[in-house]
Image (spheres, helix red, strand yellow):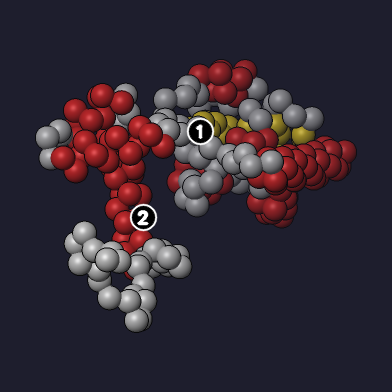
Amino acid sequence: MKVGYARVSTSDQSLDLQIDALKRAGCRNHIFEESISTSSLKRPELDRCLASLKKGDTLVIYKLDRLGRSVHFLLGLVKTLGDRGINLVSLNDPIDTTTPVGVAIFQFCAVMAELEKGIIRERTKAGLQSARARGRFGGAPPKTNAQQRSAIVTMWESGKHTGKEIAETYGIGSATLYRILAKHKKRQAKERQHPPAKKQGDTPTKRKGLKAQPEGGGRR
């Protein structure tokens, strides 16, 4: 018997494409559907699907990544299915474990997918390090400059404006506003704990042996 498994990462994505393909492949009334990310530790529909499979059955999926993105997980799953006498067919990958060649191709594709993911990760890491060395950092650019942030703090501390009014004035969200205020408060607390050291000459020093001259004084 052919049993299908279809998965999308979020509930606003459609399963129709996968389900239609699985039905054409022979999975008429035995399709398990799931809307959940592969990063989730619990996938109840996949668990139900695997539990329903019997020796001689074939698990059919639309694409390999519908089962999972981890090579370790996929290889372990295929071994478990093989030990139970269950085959795996991926409609959009050259994977059909009903044949020895299909098993070998699956293992090769899984390793290549993991290699590609590792290369992308290394490239991303190298790019970020290169950008930091040039004074650039990841993430979205700040929505306000230093002068605007100072004005925002001044408006808030005046007590004449609400947070909503300040946010609308500068076109920012309330989260951004309170993040600016929190950073200002944290900076103030740090300055109170560690005041800047006074430079020599900041305070007048008394010189011994000098007396104040009377007003209009001088030598007579």
Does residue 2 sit above or below 13 in this rendering? below
Image x and y of residue 202, in percent: 39, 63
Image x and y of residue 106, in percent: 79, 40
Find residue 186 and report its image quarter. Answer: bottom left
Instruction: Say which label, 2 or 1, has the lower sequence index.
Output: 1
- Which residue is found at the position 41% from the left and 37% from the top? 146
CA neighbours of label 1 inside 10 A, class few (<14), some (14 to 19), many (20+): few
The residue at which mark 1 appears reads as: 140
**Residue 38 showing in the rendered view:** yes
Say which of 24 and 138 sits in front.
Answer: 138
Query: In whole angstroms, how far apart are the C-alphas of marks 2 and 1?
Result: 22 Å
Between circles 2 and 1, the one closer to the viewer is 2
The residue at which mark 2 appears reads as: 187
Find residue 151 and report its image quarter. Answer: top left
Among all residues in the image, which is located at the extreme right?
Answer: 101
Among all residues in the image, which is located at the extreme left?
Answer: 160
- Which residue is found at the position 59% from the left and 41% from the top? 137
Image x and y of residue 176, in percent: 34, 37
Label 2: which secondary element: helix
Does residue 156 sit above or below 28 in this rendering? below
- Which residue is found at the position 54% from the left and 23% from the top? 19
- Residue type pointed to by label 1: Ala
Label 1: which secondary element: loop
- Which residue is found at the position 19% from the left and 28% from the top? 165
